[in-house]
Image (cartoon, rainbow, N blue to C red):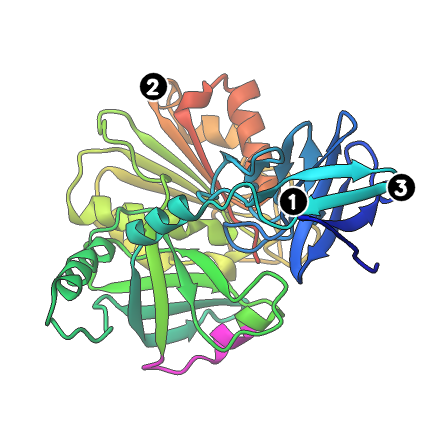
Amino acid sequence: MTREEDGAYQIVADKKDLYEGSLLKIELHGKPIVLSMVNGKVYAIDAICSHEGGPLEEGTLDRYEIECPWHGSKFDVRTGEVKNPPADIPQVAYEVKSDNDKILIKEKPKSEGTQQQTSIKKEFPLYELTLLEKKKVLGTDIMSLKFSKQNSLEKSNENDEDVEEEDENKKLLSYTAGQYAYFDIGGVTNDPKGPIRHFTIASSPTENFILISTRIRDSPYKKRLALLEEMAKVKVRGPEGKFVLHDDHSKPAVFLSGGIGVTPFRSMIKDATDRHLPIKIIMFDSNRNEENILYKMEFDEWANTNKNLKIVYTVTDEDGSETLTSASSPSSSSDWIGQRGRIDKDMLNKYLSSDDIDRSVFYVCGPPAMLNAMKSILEKELQIRNERIKAEEFTGY
């Protein structure tokens, strides 16, 4: 559409293009903006999510809150204010008016969000890490990458800024088990989800390397990640996240893992084992088949040395046939002797005592469907209060 000047405003759309509760992407001087209509009034904020660049116009609108389709961040369409994490930075909001059948936007934003954006950058400094090793997990699409823990950014040490930056570098070294960081691997173009991804740091703070594991998908970012050569440099910003072990070690921890969602649990278990934390940990690790059980050799080794650790493995489709739904379903085509089927109430009751159920903090990590199913079992079937449930979603992007 040809845009016309109207003083400080510019025509960007026809009112007929927007209806109550809908979202419409337009551009102002090449900048993507999403329009919404609530109670007959039109609002405008930047269309690119401040978290990781998600397309807000493809999200959902619930009254005045727009939800990003990628990671669930929510923003107030009236002000751009963050209403739900993981986003920390507000969206830029614009003044809107109507003239007959036209929608006009004021060229200068009414909110920039620059002050908060600056503080976020200071809170999460930039590091440059070196790729030491990458390993494809046989029989799966999973790849693990191990990076140096030492920042390799050059510093002159000639002024206070360099000293301050060097102090900030210690933040990555002192991350808490279960947190994640943002990885900019460079050379990523035309990825609809942007050139940066965040990954859980699967290594423990007690280890001398940074480990991530991910499924390699057919996207520009993942293809580039799979082609990284040893000694390649990547830029990392972080750590971030509150999916960490609770402080009261008298309360047991129950980990419910689905597939690649096991990565934060590796960090927590290794950390608890190395530091001899007096906390009981029971992990239920669900995967499609035995080959997809990530870190199994390490988990088994740690379970042998940590008397407070118990791990229950279950496979849902061991022989490649249809997914099994019962924890006790038999299969004659495999040597697997562990549990079968998805984690359910019966499986939890089999391995958890009544005291475990009554006192534990439950951690759930996996794909969206698994998260929803686990939360339903915990809240509705086992009557676990919401404050004893922590959840983190892995979308598999």
Crowding near pointer 1: few (<14 within 10 Å), some, many (20+)? some
What amino acid is found at the position of numbered circle 2 in the picture? Answer: Asp
The residue singled out by tag 3 in the image is 16
Q: Is residue 153 positioned above or below 339 on the image?
A: below
Image quarter where the N terminus lies is: bottom right
Report the residue at 37% width, 72% height from top. 234
Q: Is residue 396 left or right of residue 364?
A: right
Q: Position of residue 31 (x, y in %)?
A: 64, 58
Q: Mark 3 or mark 2, which is nearer to you?
A: 3
Q: Nearer the viewer, residue 191 or 164?
A: 164
What amino acid is found at the position of numbered circle 1 in the picture? Answer: Leu
Between discs 1 and 2, the one toward the N terminus: 1
Start and end of the magenta stretch? 223-232
Q: Is residue 83 left or right of residue 26?
A: left
Disc marking residue 324: 1
Q: Position of residue 113 (x, y in %)?
A: 46, 45
* Marks 1/3: CA–CA distance: 50 Å
